[in-house]
Image (spheres, helix red, strand yellow):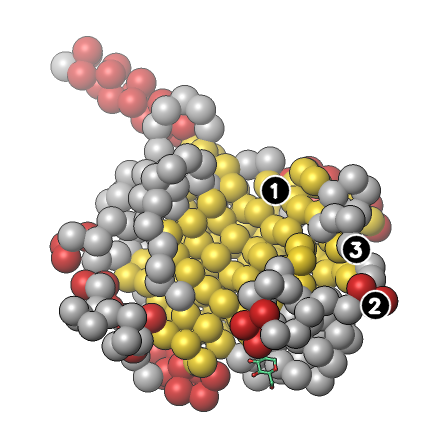
Amino acid sequence: MATSSCSRMLMVSLLLSSFIVVSFAGNFNQDFDITWGDGRGKILNNGKLLTLSLDKPSGSGLQSKNQYLFGKIDMQLKLVPGNSAGTVTAYYLSSQGPTHDEIDFEFLGNVSGDPYILHTNVFSQGKGNREQQFYLWFDPTADFHTYSILWNPKSILFSVDGTPIREFKNSESKGVPFPKNQPMRIYSSLWNADDWATRGGLVKTDWSHAPFTASYRNFKADACVWSSSGSSCKANSPPSGSKNNAWFSQQLDSTSQGRMKWVQKNYMIYNYCADTKRFPQGFPPECATTNLA
Ligand SMILES: *[C@@H]1O[C@H](CO)[C@@H](O)[C@H](O)[C@H]1NC(C)=O
């Protein structure tokens, strides 16, 4: 008895030390590193604002200091204004290595007055090819808007200003790997992609408008922070020690599903799960559970 309760205590303390659930409004100095761009990325206002910029010689990028294994992660972005054609602002979670997992938002710029494309993708164990693209129902360059990733063992939910736009459900029961074992960092970068980004590469970056700048604020993470002790969030047990862990089992209620359908019906411009030319032999298995408009 004594041994088993002792080992249980040891297990509990190991679990507690292996990941800390954090819930805080972030400070960019504490939570992020500017990783490339030779001064083109800047942390301003005592860590409250971050900007990335791009000119002809280089773009710039950031990554989070922490690695996360599940979480609800919000960031406010204000995208490159004016003629942003050819530029791409990527904001994503990713693990490392050839069988990495990744959850992507990518914002494809456009000439003034024409719409950005919000491109999304999910990679699990190195395999992506799950693109969905949207127009937005507002001008993403006029002000900050909140882009959120809710990642728990049951699903990955992409939201914009609290409105869900895409759900990638756990379809392991259909043989589709789901990101749940590899901790991910948050990354963002602004770079030149005028070979494909705007109207499929037809519109090139107009460097006379450089530098191009995207801004970030109000980072917030309710998340399992992963540390190197080797343990991870268990698929079926919510993280202990947090009052804010509703996200760990959160799923779409019918109101949110209705709003997601509204977005998908009115703003979705590409869905791999509807691309019959690309998948003549039948859609990938997860498409059966993808919420279609
Ligand atoms: C840019 O504007 C054109 C014309 O309205 C549109 O077809 C395209 O989807 C827009 N977005 C991008 C990123 O090309």
> Alpha-carbon distance for marks 1 and 3?
20 Å
In three-dimensional space, the C-alpha distance between marks 2 and 3, rounded to whole angstroms, equals 9 Å
Cβ–Cβ under 8 Å for marks 1 and 2: no
Q: Which residue is mark 2?
A: 209
Q: Amino acid at mark 1?
A: Gln
Determine the image quadrant of residue 7: top left
Q: Nearer the viewer, mark 1 or mark 3?
A: 3
Residue beneath disc 3: 55
Callout 1: SS: strand
Q: Which residue appears at 26% of the width and 77% of the height?
A: 276
Residue 63 marker = 1
Mark 2 and mark 3 lie on one chain; the one further toward the N terminus is: 3
Image vertical order of residue 105 relative to residue 17, above or below: below
Residue 281 locus on image (x, y percent): 16, 69
Sequence-wise, the earlier of marks 1 and 3 is: 3
Mark 1–mark 2 distance (CA, rounded to whole Å): 26 Å
- Nearer-N-terminus badge (1/2): 1
